[in-house]
Image (cartoon, helix red, strand yellow):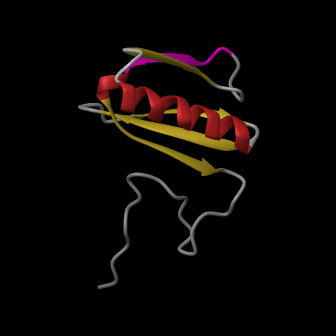
Amino acid sequence: MFMIDIVLKNTPSILSVQRKEAEGADEVYKQVTEALKAGSPALLELTCEKEVGKRFMFQVSEVLAVQVTDKSSAGSTSGRPPGFFALTATAE
């Protein structure tokens, strides 16, 4: 299972959809990045393969970042999953 995370300006939460295959995740990633490069369409709607019925529409101009991660992988060597806002542990 692959997770596509989208961060929007002035929004504390992350919008996420999932795809079963890497090709599907890459397709969504390219769809978002191409819309960012072109500036159109103004609105983009995404759906989730895991949660049937989950969908959201957002304004492309509000996107700050997009990320694709493999949920089936164990994550990084530190034991935390990859992500935009992963907290770092400091030894004191």
Residue drawn at x 71%, y 29% as measured from the top left: 50
Residue drawn at x 33%, y 77% as measured from the top left: 90
Residue 70 rendering spot, x and y as whole percentages: 65, 52
Residue drawn at x 72%, y 40% as measured from the top left: 23
Residue 62 falls left or right of residue 17:
left
- Quarter of the image for the N terminus: give it: top right
Q: Residue furthest right?
A: 21
Q: Quadrant of residue 88?
A: bottom left
**59 vs 15, nearest the viewer:** 59
Residue 65 rendering spot, x and y as whole percentages: 38, 41
Residue 92 rendering spot, x and y as whole percentages: 29, 85
Q: Quadrant of residue 49?
A: top right
Residue 39 falls left or right of residue 49:
left
Residue drawn at x 70%, y 35% as measured from the top left: 24
Residue 30 falls left or right of residue 9:
right
The magenta segment is 53-59
- Principal secondary structure, stretch drawn in magenta: strand
Residue 11 falls left or right of residue 29:
left
Relative height, residue 61 to residue 70 (above, below): above
The reply to whether the magenta stretch includes residue 28 is: no
